[in-house]
Amino acid sequence: MAIEKHNTPMIDQLEDGPWPSFIKGIKRLRDEHPSERINAMANDLLGQLETSYETRLGYWKGGTITVFGYGGGIIPRFTELKDDEGKPRFPKAAEFHTMRIQPAPGFFYNTDMLRKIIDIDEKYGSGMICMHGQTGNLMLVGMDSDAIQPCFDEMNELGWDLGGAGPCVRTGMSCVGAARCEHSNIDEHNIMRTLLNNFQDDMHRPALPYKFKFKVSGCANDCTNSIQRADMAIIGTWRDDMKVDQDEVKAFVEKKGRKYVVDNVISRCPTNALSLNDDDTLDVNNKDCVRCMHCINVMTKALSPGDDKGATILIGGKRTLKIGDLFGTVLIPFFKTDTEEDMEKLVELAEEIIDFFAENALEHERTGEMIERIGLANFLEGIGVDVDPNMVERPRTSSYVRMDGWDEEAAKWEERKKAAAS
Amino acid sequence: MSDQPRMPIESGTPDHFQYMHPTLRKNYGQWAYHDRPRPGVLHHVSKNGDEVWTVKTGSARQLDILTLRTICDIADEFCDGHLRFTMRGNMEFMVTDESKVEPLIKRVEEAGFPVGGTGNSVTMLSHTQGWLHCDIPGTDASGVVKALMDELYDEFVAEEMPNRVHITTSCCQINCGGQGDIAINVQHTKPPKINHDLVANACERPAVVARCPVAAIRPAMVNGKPTLEVDEKKCICCGACFPPCPPMQINDSEYTRLSIWVGGKHSNARTKPMFHKLVASNIPNNAPRWPEVAAVVKKILKAYKENANEWERMGEWVERIGWKRFFELTDLPFTKYHIDNWRGSRNNLNQSAHIRF
């Protein structure tokens, strides 16, 4: 049965130009796909989208849909474009839900598996797949209510599980990491999997005050944007000396010239920890180095992270709602993640944090906002983490604070110093 | 008794090694260094001597399955059936044989995928869902990105910027969308229009009152029905009340506008991470190609490209030259709205006698 194609002059203009066009993609589904169901769904999706482009308004409303055994993971979408009798104007795309799937860390696929996912989406979905959402989900976009359960069952049997949606632990994200990056300081993928797979109950059955996100970056370049977007950011670093291959330094100076090296490496070090010697070798003051990664980014062959690697853990990053954008701030300056025991400790820390968040955050309050409200010191006390000067940009500048517990607190510091020395 | 429903297998995040190319698996954690032979290609060398060339390409991110099958065909043909995606919606095809690089580039370009996005390029815009799928969008996402990437195509396929440029979009004012060297975000300019007949049934009113960042919403009775009202003098038009209470419609064909922000950066390289800062607003939400947005973005990119030093990210460049010079170079108006008045705002004022002339 031939479908009556909607007239879409506005979005047709997005077919032109050199960049890949998602409108062309949807039209391919309408015009070239063998399934009439998919042709009709794509046609009505185009109809609804064209209406949005004409009126500059959105027309989807949410709802509550999930699968047996879970409480979230599906983003329901019902059209609000109805005729006078209350019937959808674009009935074939009137239900257009998204299924969020947790991908493997690093967004790796083999084509054998990707083709199976495509086949399942072809059977149940609209034929549109988002690779990937901003939180890190693989998203099968556009499915009607009846298709959700059988589609999930097939995906689940293949080894895929639903991602997070709503007030819960969300799907995580890791950079490419150790799989293809020399800057990797930690086993990013294992950390992401270990953390997330410990909290699947909190992901699938939303019962937290609000969302909670993990992101893992292997170095301070923070390719997953974890400082600005993750409640718990795990960022790789090292605490011994950075490695310098002096022959490669000399070769780099030879190739790029001294001026380039001084202007772009030496003087760009944020803590003036670098000095170029007269013989074109490099001095590094590792005590001053803050592991920012700049010199290593520029001189990839000559410079690299040290051997005693671990992670800096930050807490509380988020976007605008409700009190404004917040960066994550340092919670643990250096955390080893090498052994199974280390990883157990990391999971325990995350459990402490999420338990505290569940009990103390207000409804719809992110971790960063909760900490802003109660103060970092109270949060640290709540989860049993000791204070550290690496947690602050500078100490307090206001005297409006009651400090009659000073001697006890100072004694704790001395005790910790003694314990660290022994 | 009816059939038992199938219970889910809570398998969670799957193992990554099963999908990784064998050479990546073998050299996991063993990489020594990388270089970039040409824009769009990364070359990684392992301590074992193994080498991998990555051809990075743009994509529409919202992919139809016919295109995805073509992508699979390419990965089968050149990459032993493996590929990965990046968090900005680019695709990475990896080969272990240098002689395959040029034919692979030819193949992906023929299939319509631009090769680039590496090093000092303007890489793919990270974006949200927009009119295609979001329930609260003030604008589209994929369409804005498509329109802008058409305009910025030449900067995607080259590495001619002082440092990398990450651009982001956000189709509402409150939630999604990241920080960017340039961020294009929805900005509402009028308070929500309230359908008082629907509020009582559709909204959990105390939750909506609590959601407002400036406590501008209070319970009210209209025509004998419990509803909510907005103190329009206090309202900052953010739209935070709209998701929990759809009858408080914030989106508007005319008054939903776009703002442009610059200087966000998540990397810790050189300077600490930065948030983006407001530079332009009241830009019309002009679908389908948003030419006014593109004009401002290109003006900012031109000033950055011509004036920044090597390795300076946009935010670092502006901090060096100062905001006065930024507004001169970009020929954008500086208004009272640029002066922060939110919590912590004094930290964004010039608390010094450092003046630029």
Image: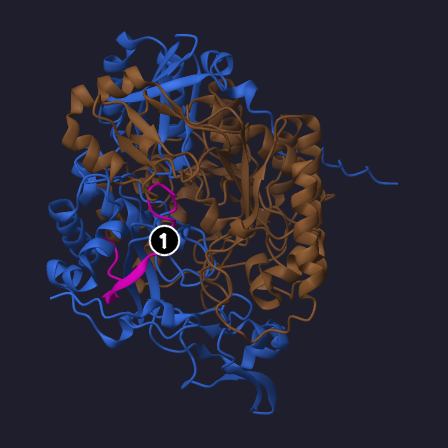
- Counting labels gives 1
Image position of A29 (left or right of A318):
left
Q: Image quadrant for the N terminus of chain B?
A: top right
Place of residue B48 in the rendered image (x, y in percent of width and height, measured from the top left): 43, 8
- What residue sits 77% from the left and 39% below the top? B5
Does residue A267 appear to the left or right of A61 in the view shown? left
| Depth order, front residue of A194/B311 | B311
> What kind of residue is marked 1?
Met
Could you tell me residue A270's position as x and y percent? 33, 44
Residue on which the image places disc 1? B274
The structure residue drawn at horizontal position 25% and vertical position 67%, both measured from the top left corner, is B281
User: Chain drawn blue, letter?
Assistant: B
* Label 1 SS: loop
Q: Main secondary structure of the magenta part?
A: loop
Please determine whether, in this image, residue A280 is positioned above or below residue A364: above
**Magenta highlight on residue B270:** yes
Crowding at dot 1, Cα within 10 Å, few <14 / some 14-19 / many 20+, comes out as: many
Who's the residue at 41% across and 60% down the image? B137
- Identity of the residue drawn at 65% across and 59% down: A379
What chain is the brown one?
A
- Residues rendered magenta in the picture: B266-289
Residue B280: within the magenta? Answer: yes
Q: In the picture, which quadrant includes the C terminus of chain B?
A: bottom left
Residue B115 picture location, percent across and down: 25, 28
Q: In the picture provided, is B328 more to the left or to the right than A405?
A: left
